[in-house]
Amino acid sequence: MILDTNAVSAILSGDPAIAAVLEGDRRHHLPAIVLGEYRFGLSGSRWKRRIEPWLERLERESTILVVDEHTARSYAAVRRELGSKGRPLPENDVWIAALAVQHRLPVVTRDQHFDHVPGVRRVSW
């Protein structure tokens, strides 16, 4: 399963509901986009020194999904489809959705706008 930024935050906070959702997932998939979002948030946080080692461990224990030429094709298709339906997503979420389509993996998120992306299954907690 692909972890969205709010899923990473829920894991960090020790939310038992997300732990139950991820229980059978042997290795999480973490988009480089999510890492960027999370590191940006940490860069201005007073908790940076406390959370950064945890994030680095999550990064080591996850499969990092990077954007490549196949992702670019998925991105274009996802963005065009959503635009034609009048349902744009935040830019970073379009990239995350493109990775989900490319790798055929569900996205663990509370963001309901992923429900409008054809070929993407959203898993919430």
Image (tube, rainbow, N blue to C red):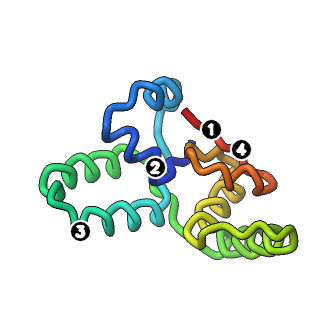
Q: What residue type is labelled 4?
A: Arg
Q: What residue type is labelled 2?
A: Asn
Which class describes the residues within 10 Å of circle 1: few (<14), some (14-19), or many (20+)? many
Q: Is residue 74 left or right of residue 11?
A: right
Marks 2 and 3, how far apart at CA: 17 Å
Q: Earlier in the sequence, mark 2 or mark 3?
A: 2
Residue 43 got which mark? 3
| Residue at figure coordinates x 47%, y 31% from the top left | 18
Residue 121 got which mark? 4
In percent of width and height, residue 30 lies at 47, 53
Marks 2 and 4, how far apart at CA: 16 Å
Which class describes the residues within 10 Å of circle 2: few (<14), some (14-19), or many (20+)? some
- SS at mark 1? strand
Q: Earlier in the sequence, mark 1 or mark 3?
A: 3
Q: What residue type is labelled 1?
A: Val
Q: Which of marks 2 and 4 is nearer the N terminus?
A: 2
Residue indicated by mark 2: 6
**Is there CB contact under 8 Å for labels 2 and 3?**
no
Q: Which amino acid does label 3 sit on?
A: Ser
In percent of width and height, residue 64 lies at 45, 56
Q: Earlier in the sequence, mark 3 or mark 4?
A: 3
Residue indicated by mark 1: 123
